[in-house]
Image (cartoon, coloured by chain):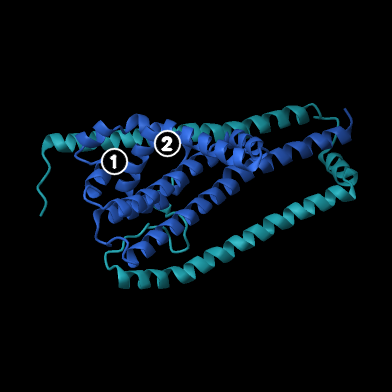
Chain colours: A cyan, B blue
């Protein structure tokens, strides 16, 4: 059995964990600020542009104008972009299913060679575990 | 302003919001998956190296490399430039030492003390490749990645050999700048990978 830690060692360990968590907290706040700050800015300017329309135009008029004024080329571009996204999504599902199907076999084969093999602890399909997300 | 102009503004705004969603969700997730895929490939190469007798599975250097790669794989979604810098600021070597933990550099030094030169070069190349992947991912996952993309595109227009030289110079400069934060990130990954 390992030697129990002294009060000073435990204090230093707590300090280490506190600093680590503080760094994570700061990163999380800055990342959230960048992500949702940019969203808020886009929505704000969109709102300012559209709010001047209040009482003058109906939503249906705008949507109708949007649909009727798009050229065939623009429709094609949107259709191609949409198809690309759908294709990418379906390929991703396929890859994750393949990873899930093959990983346990790979793990068994590697364990036969190295019984002390360590793992990344990701989910069987290669995704981050929910408890590791923040 | 007529209805058509408003419709165009609305369309533009929705397109920007779609791009925002693509960058912060789809692109970020995709870049993490690419990073993990490359790190898995590197870990597999290291495993094959050990299986071929290049190094023992029980050698401390093998264990440290594998554990650190596991840490990067597990927390690949947290490898960002910001985290990189802040980890370097808050988790200095002295903090590790005070907590009775050993930093990656110290553990690596102890593990590779008696390793023959040829084997050491191989092990160092694995460590270098691991760090290259981490540095690239840190830049790709930052919202300012477009700036780096522009620099990359400008460099790519240079003739082949000059491009390679510039790429290496820029990469070495960035790596030397990030040396200390990188050591802290390696130590953190080593701790995370062993849990």
- Give neighbour class at mark 1: few <14, some 14-19, many 20+ (Cα, 10 Å): some
Query: Of the numbered discs in the image, which one, if any, rests on residue B52?
Result: none
- Residue at 20% across, 34% down: B98
Residue drawn at 27 percent across, 62 percent down? B56
| Residue name at image x 38 percent, y 59 percent | B46
Q: CA distance from mark 2 to mark 1?
A: 16 Å
Q: Position of residue B135 (x, y in %)?
A: 46, 41
Please name the residue shown 31% across and 42% down the image.
B187
Work out whether B39 lies above or below B95.
below
Q: How many marks on residues?
A: 2
Question: Which of the 4 quarters of the picture holds residue B40?
Answer: bottom left
Left/right of residue B73 with respect to residue B99 in the rendered view: right
Disc 2 residue crowd, few under 14, some 14–19, many 20+, Cα 10 Å? many
Residue B61 shows up from this direction: yes
Q: Chain of mark 1?
A: B
Mark in front: 2 vs 1: 1
Q: Nearer the viewer, residue B16 or B163?
A: B163
**Residue A55 percent across, percent down from the top left:** 83, 30
The disc, 2 or 1, on the residue closer to the chain's N-terminal end is 2
Q: Is residue B5 left or right of residue A42?
A: right
């Amino acid at each position: 059995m390992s030697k129990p830690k002294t009060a000073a060692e435990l204090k230093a360990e707590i300090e280490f964990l506190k600093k680590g968590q503080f760094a994570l907290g700061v990163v999380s706040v800055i990342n959230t600020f960048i992500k949702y700050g940019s969203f808020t800015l886009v929505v704000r300017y969109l709102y300012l542009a559209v709010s001047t329309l209040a009482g003058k135009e109906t939503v249906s008029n705008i949507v109708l104008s949007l649909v009727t004024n798009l050229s065939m080329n623009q429709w094609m571009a949107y259709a191609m972009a949409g198809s690309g996204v759908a294709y990418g999504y379906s390929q991703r599902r396929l890859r994750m299913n393949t990873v899930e199907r093959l990983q346990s076999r790979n793990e068994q084969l590697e364990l036969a060679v190295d019984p002390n093999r360590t793992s990344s602890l990701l989910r069987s399909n290669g995704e981050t575990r929910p408890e590791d997300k923040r | 302003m007529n209805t058509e102009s408003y419709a165009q503004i609305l369309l533009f705004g929705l397109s920007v919001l779609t791009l925002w969603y693509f960058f912060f969700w789809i692109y970020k997730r995709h870049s993490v998956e690419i990073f993990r895929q490359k790190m898995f490939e590197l870990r597999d190469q290291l495993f094959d190296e050990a299986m071929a007798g290049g190094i023992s599975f029980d050698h401390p250097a093998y264990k440290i490399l594998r554990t650190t790669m596991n840490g990067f794989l597990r927390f690949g979604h947290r490898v960002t430039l910001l985290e990189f810098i802040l980890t370097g600021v808050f988790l200095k070597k002295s903090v590790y030492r005070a907590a009775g933990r050993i930093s990656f550099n110290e553990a690596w030094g102890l593990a590779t003390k008696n390793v023959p030169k040829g084997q050491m070069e191989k092990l160092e190349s694995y460590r270098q490749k691991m760090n290259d992947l981490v540095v690239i991912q840190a830049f790709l996952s930052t919202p300012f990645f477009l700036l780096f993309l522009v620099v990359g595109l400008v460099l790519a227009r240079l003739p082949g050999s000059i491009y390679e030289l510039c790429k290496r110079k820029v990469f070495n400069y960035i790596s030397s700048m990030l040396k200390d934060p990188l050591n802290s990130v390696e130590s953190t990954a080593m701790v995370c990978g062993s849990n």
